Amino acid sequence: MSHRAQTFPRAQILQELSLRCQALAANDNRGFKQEFEELDDVGKNLPTRAGDSKANREKNRYPYILPYDHCRVRLSVQNSQPHTDYINANFVPVLCDRYWPLERCTAEHGLIQVTTVTCKQGPDYFITTINLRQRACSTVRIITQYYYPAWPDRGIPKDVSSLCAFTEHVRQELEAIPLLGPAVVHCSAGVGRSGTFVTLLWLMQLCARGIRPDIRAAVEDLRLHR
């Protein structure tokens, strides 16, 4: 027997969310600070053996940011070497190099060829179509990349409305094209900006479906996966 979440009008959801945020922001953001502190221990007891193993330690950008074992991304093992399946990444329900060429040309990274096909510029972001191919293989994967450079590392977005508009654009694109592969989100460490964007996208998806969003519950759930 399946159970569907109760849905509500969008206007009601937005009004309730606004009131909730006002209550949390009272007394110098006391409510927000309390919820943030309560989230500090979430996920600390989950094992990260693969990332902490001697064979994989050098593959982590930061030694204190490791993928949980229960939901880590496992690559195909190469040449029967047991540790070649490791990458510091996690599957989540629902400072990297620029690996794609800015111009319409091809860049090679080992056996992988990355070709920029088109690039469109939005207000504060870029939408790039990329062809991904493994050398000596005829199969081509078409990737749509949404790049938001207006959010600096260790900083905040210069315009919150711009970030919301960008996230809403991504949401609409994801829902307009059925049967897409998994969406991959990354920043530098794959935690701060990535986690904020995934949470915002998730909450917008709930609102669009008429489901009341719960910001703390969303953050807590994501912390159990990354």
Image: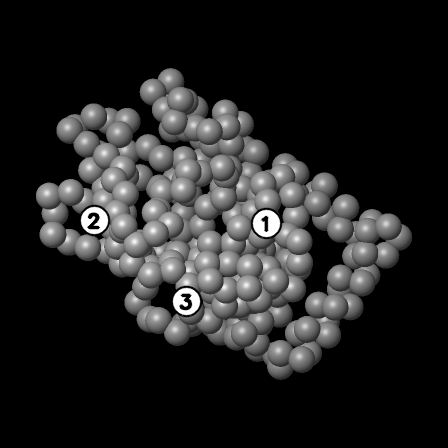
Q: Which residue is mark 2?
A: 133
Residue at x 46%, y 29% (from the top left corner):
61
Rendering coords of residue 154 (x, y %): 62, 39
Number of numbered tags placed on the structure image = 3
164 or 87, which is in the foreground? 164
Q: Tell me if I can see residue 126 in this picture.
A: yes
Q: What whole-number distance in Å separates the C-alpha atoms at marks 1 and 3?
A: 21 Å
If you read the primary sequence from the N terminus, does the residue marked by circle 2 or circle 3 appear first? 2
20 or 155, which is in the foreground? 155
Does dot 1 land on a helix, a strand or a loop? loop
Up-down relation of residue 213 to residue 101 (above or below): below
Q: Amino acid at mark 1?
A: Trp
138 or 42, which is in the foreground? 138
Rendering coords of residue 144 (x, y %): 36, 59
Q: Which residue is mark 1?
A: 151
> In the visual, does 148 lie left or right of 29?
left
Q: Which residue is mark 3?
A: 174
